[in-house]
Amino acid sequence: MAQVTSGVTVAEQVKENLMRVRERIALAAERAGRDPAEIVLVGATKSVDVERIRAAIEAGLEHIGENYAQEAWAKYQQIGDAVTWHFIGHLQTNKAKLVVRFCKFVQSLDRLALAEELNKRAEQMGRIVECLVEVNVGGEATKSGVALEEVERLIRQASQFPNIRIVGLMAIPPYLPDPEQVRPFFRKMRELFERLKGLDLPNVEMRYLSMGMSHDFEVAIEEGANMVRIGTAIFGPRPAKGGAGG
Ligand SMILES: *Cc1c(COP(=O)(O)O)cnc(C)c1O
Protein backbone atom coordinates (compact mmCIF):
# COMPACT_ATOMS: atom_id res chain seq x y z
CA MET A 1 0.00 0.00 0.00
CA ALA A 2 1.31 3.45 -0.89
CA GLN A 3 3.02 5.39 1.87
CA VAL A 4 3.28 9.12 2.39
CA THR A 5 6.35 10.61 4.07
CA SER A 6 4.97 10.57 7.60
CA GLY A 7 4.50 6.80 7.44
CA VAL A 8 0.72 7.13 7.40
CA THR A 9 -0.84 5.13 4.59
CA VAL A 10 -2.92 6.81 1.93
CA ALA A 11 -5.95 4.90 3.20
CA GLU A 12 -5.40 6.09 6.78
CA GLN A 13 -5.01 9.65 5.60
CA VAL A 14 -8.28 9.51 3.62
CA LYS A 15 -10.12 8.04 6.60
CA GLU A 16 -8.76 10.73 8.88
CA ASN A 17 -9.72 13.47 6.42
CA LEU A 18 -13.19 12.03 6.06
CA MET A 19 -13.66 12.05 9.82
CA ARG A 20 -12.59 15.71 9.98
CA VAL A 21 -14.97 16.65 7.19
CA ARG A 22 -17.85 14.86 8.91
CA GLU A 23 -17.11 16.74 12.12
CA ARG A 24 -17.08 20.05 10.28
CA ILE A 25 -20.36 19.20 8.54
CA ALA A 26 -21.94 18.36 11.90
CA LEU A 27 -20.74 21.61 13.48
CA ALA A 28 -21.99 23.71 10.56
CA ALA A 29 -25.37 21.95 10.70
CA GLU A 30 -25.62 22.55 14.44
CA ARG A 31 -24.75 26.23 14.02
CA ALA A 32 -27.64 26.46 11.58
CA GLY A 33 -29.95 24.61 13.98
CA ARG A 34 -30.20 21.63 11.66
CA ASP A 35 -29.79 17.90 12.06
CA PRO A 36 -26.33 16.83 10.77
CA ALA A 37 -27.90 13.53 9.65
CA GLU A 38 -29.89 15.33 6.97
CA ILE A 39 -26.74 16.44 5.12
CA VAL A 40 -25.71 14.05 2.34
CA LEU A 41 -21.96 13.93 1.78
CA VAL A 42 -20.91 13.20 -1.79
CA GLY A 43 -17.20 12.53 -2.24
CA ALA A 44 -16.02 14.26 -5.42
CA THR A 45 -13.64 11.71 -6.89
CA LYS A 46 -12.50 13.03 -10.29
CA SER A 47 -8.85 11.98 -10.78
CA VAL A 48 -8.89 10.16 -7.41
CA ASP A 49 -7.59 6.58 -7.65
CA VAL A 50 -9.64 3.54 -6.70
CA GLU A 51 -7.48 2.82 -3.64
CA ARG A 52 -8.42 6.16 -2.09
CA ILE A 53 -12.07 5.80 -3.04
CA ARG A 54 -12.19 2.33 -1.47
CA ALA A 55 -10.62 3.66 1.71
CA ALA A 56 -13.35 6.28 1.95
CA ILE A 57 -16.08 3.71 1.33
CA GLU A 58 -14.61 1.47 4.04
CA ALA A 59 -14.76 4.47 6.35
CA GLY A 60 -18.45 4.85 5.61
CA LEU A 61 -18.71 7.16 2.59
CA GLU A 62 -21.97 6.26 0.81
CA HIS A 63 -22.04 8.62 -2.19
CA ILE A 64 -19.45 9.55 -4.78
CA GLY A 65 -19.65 12.01 -7.64
CA GLU A 66 -17.66 11.80 -10.86
CA ASN A 67 -17.16 14.38 -13.63
CA TYR A 68 -16.03 12.34 -16.62
CA ALA A 69 -18.15 9.51 -17.99
CA GLN A 70 -15.34 7.21 -19.15
CA GLU A 71 -13.29 7.68 -16.00
CA ALA A 72 -16.36 7.04 -13.88
CA TRP A 73 -17.29 3.92 -15.83
CA ALA A 74 -13.76 2.51 -15.47
CA LYS A 75 -13.95 3.01 -11.70
CA TYR A 76 -17.44 1.54 -11.55
CA GLN A 77 -16.03 -1.65 -13.09
CA GLN A 78 -13.82 -1.99 -10.01
CA ILE A 79 -16.01 -0.58 -7.26
CA GLY A 80 -19.51 -1.51 -8.39
CA ASP A 81 -22.57 -0.78 -6.31
CA ALA A 82 -20.74 -0.57 -2.97
CA VAL A 83 -21.53 3.13 -3.20
CA THR A 84 -24.20 5.36 -4.79
CA TRP A 85 -22.91 7.03 -7.97
CA HIS A 86 -23.62 10.62 -8.91
CA PHE A 87 -22.63 12.33 -12.12
CA ILE A 88 -21.60 15.91 -11.33
CA GLY A 89 -19.67 17.09 -14.40
CA HIS A 90 -20.81 18.55 -17.67
CA LEU A 91 -22.56 15.69 -19.47
CA GLN A 92 -22.40 15.38 -23.24
CA THR A 93 -25.60 14.01 -24.72
CA ASN A 94 -23.74 11.09 -26.31
CA LYS A 95 -22.48 9.99 -22.87
CA ALA A 96 -25.93 9.88 -21.29
CA LYS A 97 -26.41 6.25 -22.23
CA LEU A 98 -23.26 5.19 -20.38
CA VAL A 99 -23.98 7.29 -17.31
CA VAL A 100 -27.53 5.98 -16.93
CA ARG A 101 -26.11 2.47 -16.60
CA PHE A 102 -24.61 3.11 -13.18
CA CYS A 103 -25.43 6.57 -11.85
CA LYS A 104 -28.50 6.93 -9.66
CA PHE A 105 -28.17 10.72 -9.72
CA VAL A 106 -27.26 13.18 -12.46
CA GLN A 107 -26.60 16.52 -10.75
CA SER A 108 -25.70 18.41 -13.89
CA LEU A 109 -28.94 18.57 -15.84
CA ASP A 110 -28.60 21.85 -17.72
CA ARG A 111 -30.68 21.56 -20.88
CA LEU A 112 -33.83 20.00 -22.25
CA ALA A 113 -32.01 17.91 -24.88
CA LEU A 114 -30.07 16.18 -22.10
CA ALA A 115 -33.25 15.53 -20.12
CA GLU A 116 -34.81 13.99 -23.23
CA GLU A 117 -31.80 11.74 -23.85
CA LEU A 118 -31.53 10.66 -20.20
CA ASN A 119 -35.24 9.84 -20.23
CA LYS A 120 -34.91 7.78 -23.40
CA ARG A 121 -31.94 5.80 -22.13
CA ALA A 122 -33.46 5.32 -18.69
CA GLU A 123 -36.65 4.02 -20.28
CA GLN A 124 -34.66 1.51 -22.35
CA MET A 125 -33.05 0.26 -19.13
CA GLY A 126 -36.29 0.29 -17.17
CA ARG A 127 -34.89 2.82 -14.73
CA ILE A 128 -35.63 6.21 -13.26
CA VAL A 129 -32.74 8.67 -13.10
CA GLU A 130 -32.87 11.24 -10.33
CA CYS A 131 -31.80 14.62 -11.66
CA LEU A 132 -30.73 17.87 -10.09
CA VAL A 133 -30.86 20.97 -12.25
CA GLU A 134 -27.50 22.73 -12.34
CA VAL A 135 -27.88 26.45 -11.82
CA ASN A 136 -25.31 28.98 -12.98
CA VAL A 137 -25.96 31.12 -9.92
CA GLY A 138 -23.09 33.51 -10.60
CA GLY A 139 -24.07 34.06 -14.23
CA GLU A 140 -20.53 33.11 -15.25
CA ALA A 141 -19.87 32.72 -18.97
CA THR A 142 -17.23 30.02 -18.30
CA LYS A 143 -19.57 27.77 -16.32
CA SER A 144 -22.32 25.45 -17.41
CA GLY A 145 -25.69 25.48 -15.74
CA VAL A 146 -29.02 27.15 -16.34
CA ALA A 147 -29.51 30.86 -15.72
CA LEU A 148 -31.56 31.60 -12.60
CA GLU A 149 -34.47 32.90 -14.65
CA GLU A 150 -34.56 29.73 -16.79
CA VAL A 151 -34.63 27.15 -14.01
CA GLU A 152 -38.38 26.98 -13.51
CA ARG A 153 -39.03 26.60 -17.22
CA LEU A 154 -36.51 23.76 -17.60
CA ILE A 155 -37.98 21.99 -14.58
CA ARG A 156 -41.52 22.29 -15.93
CA GLN A 157 -40.42 20.89 -19.29
CA ALA A 158 -38.19 18.13 -17.91
CA SER A 159 -40.82 17.00 -15.43
CA GLN A 160 -42.91 15.74 -18.34
CA PHE A 161 -40.47 12.86 -18.90
CA PRO A 162 -41.55 9.76 -16.99
CA ASN A 163 -38.12 8.13 -16.58
CA ILE A 164 -36.33 11.02 -15.00
CA ARG A 165 -37.31 12.68 -11.76
CA ILE A 166 -36.31 16.19 -10.82
CA VAL A 167 -35.18 15.98 -7.20
CA GLY A 168 -33.35 19.24 -6.57
CA LEU A 169 -30.87 21.89 -7.57
CA MET A 170 -27.09 21.92 -7.81
CA ALA A 171 -24.82 24.94 -8.03
CA ILE A 172 -21.15 25.77 -8.29
CA PRO A 173 -20.99 29.42 -7.26
CA PRO A 174 -18.08 31.63 -8.28
CA TYR A 175 -14.77 30.82 -6.63
CA LEU A 176 -13.99 33.60 -4.17
CA PRO A 177 -11.04 33.34 -1.79
CA ASP A 178 -13.09 34.10 1.31
CA PRO A 179 -16.03 31.66 1.63
CA GLU A 180 -18.01 34.42 3.34
CA GLN A 181 -18.11 36.18 -0.03
CA VAL A 182 -19.90 33.17 -1.49
CA ARG A 183 -22.70 33.34 1.08
CA PRO A 184 -25.01 35.59 -1.00
CA PHE A 185 -24.91 33.07 -3.87
CA PHE A 186 -25.82 30.21 -1.55
CA ARG A 187 -28.63 32.31 -0.14
CA LYS A 188 -29.95 33.03 -3.61
CA MET A 189 -29.99 29.29 -4.32
CA ARG A 190 -31.85 28.59 -1.11
CA GLU A 191 -34.50 31.15 -2.03
CA LEU A 192 -34.93 29.64 -5.48
CA PHE A 193 -35.09 26.15 -3.97
CA GLU A 194 -37.80 27.14 -1.50
CA ARG A 195 -39.80 28.96 -4.15
CA LEU A 196 -39.74 25.96 -6.50
CA LYS A 197 -40.61 23.62 -3.66
CA GLY A 198 -43.61 25.83 -2.91
CA LEU A 199 -44.89 25.42 -6.48
CA ASP A 200 -45.42 21.72 -5.77
CA LEU A 201 -45.03 20.79 -9.45
CA PRO A 202 -46.19 17.32 -10.54
CA ASN A 203 -43.39 14.73 -10.87
CA VAL A 204 -40.97 17.12 -9.12
CA GLU A 205 -39.61 16.53 -5.63
CA MET A 206 -37.46 19.38 -4.39
CA ARG A 207 -35.47 17.24 -1.95
CA TYR A 208 -31.82 18.16 -2.49
CA LEU A 209 -30.01 21.45 -2.51
CA SER A 210 -26.51 20.42 -3.59
CA MET A 211 -23.95 23.14 -2.96
CA GLY A 212 -20.69 23.54 -1.09
CA MET A 213 -17.23 22.21 -1.94
CA SER A 214 -14.02 21.85 0.10
CA HIS A 215 -13.39 25.52 0.70
CA ASP A 216 -16.96 26.72 1.27
CA PHE A 217 -19.15 23.82 2.42
CA GLU A 218 -19.66 25.13 5.93
CA VAL A 219 -21.14 28.38 4.65
CA ALA A 220 -23.26 26.39 2.16
CA ILE A 221 -24.70 24.26 4.98
CA GLU A 222 -25.41 27.32 7.09
CA GLU A 223 -27.35 28.68 4.13
CA GLY A 224 -29.41 25.53 3.59
CA ALA A 225 -27.42 22.98 1.59
CA ASN A 226 -28.42 19.42 2.40
CA MET A 227 -25.99 17.84 -0.06
CA VAL A 228 -22.32 18.81 -0.28
CA ARG A 229 -19.74 17.64 -2.84
CA ILE A 230 -16.28 17.44 -1.35
CA GLY A 231 -13.09 16.32 -3.06
CA THR A 232 -9.82 17.89 -1.94
CA ALA A 233 -10.62 18.00 1.78
CA ILE A 234 -11.13 14.22 1.76
CA PHE A 235 -8.80 12.90 -0.93
CA GLY A 236 -6.06 15.54 -1.00
CA PRO A 237 -5.06 17.86 -3.85
CA ARG A 238 -5.69 16.70 -7.40
CA PRO A 239 -2.91 16.61 -9.99
CA ALA A 240 -3.14 19.72 -12.19
CA LYS A 241 -5.26 19.00 -15.25
CA GLY A 242 -7.14 21.06 -17.82
CA GLY A 243 -10.87 20.85 -18.52
CA ALA A 244 -13.90 20.90 -16.28
CA GLY A 245 -16.30 18.31 -17.62
CA GLY A 246 -17.00 15.56 -20.07
C1 LIG B 1 -14.39 18.87 -8.22
C2 LIG B 1 -15.78 19.16 -7.89
C3 LIG B 1 -16.19 19.28 -6.56
C4 LIG B 1 -15.25 19.17 -5.37
O1 LIG B 1 -14.29 20.17 -5.36
P1 LIG B 1 -13.24 20.29 -4.14
O2 LIG B 1 -12.86 21.72 -4.14
O3 LIG B 1 -12.11 19.38 -4.47
O4 LIG B 1 -13.94 19.89 -2.91
C5 LIG B 1 -17.53 19.52 -6.33
N1 LIG B 1 -18.42 19.67 -7.33
C6 LIG B 1 -18.05 19.56 -8.62
C7 LIG B 1 -19.08 19.70 -9.67
C8 LIG B 1 -16.72 19.32 -8.94
O5 LIG B 1 -16.36 19.24 -10.23
Image (cartoon, grey):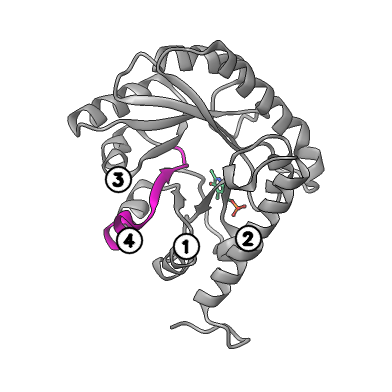
Instruction: Mark 2 or mark 1: name the one nearer the start of the chain.
Output: 1
Residue drawn at (36%, 40%) of the image? 104
The residue under label 3 is which amino acid type?
Phe
CA separation in Å, label 4 and label 3: 11 Å
Looking at the rendering, which quadrant does residue 202 occupy? top left
Q: Quadrant of the image for the N terminus?
A: bottom left
- The Cα–Cα distance between marks 2 and 4, rounded to whole angstroms, is 21 Å
Secondary element at tag 1: loop
Q: Residue 102 carries which label?
A: 3
Magenta region: which residues?
75-90
Q: What residue type is labelled 4?
A: Ile
Quadrant that contains the C terminus? top left
Q: Identify the mark nearer the N-term, 2 or 3.
A: 3
Q: Is mark 4 on a helix, strand or loop?
A: helix
Q: Distance between the residues labelled 1 and 4?
A: 13 Å
Residue 237 visible in the picture: no
> What residue is shown at x 62% (from left), y 20% (from top)?
148
- Residue positioned 64% across, 47% down in the render: 36
Spatial separation of the CA atoms under disc 2 and disc 3: 25 Å
Which mark, residue 233? 2
Mark 2 or mark 4: whose residue is earlier in sequence: 4
Is the CB of mark 2 within 8 Å of ligand 1?
Answer: yes
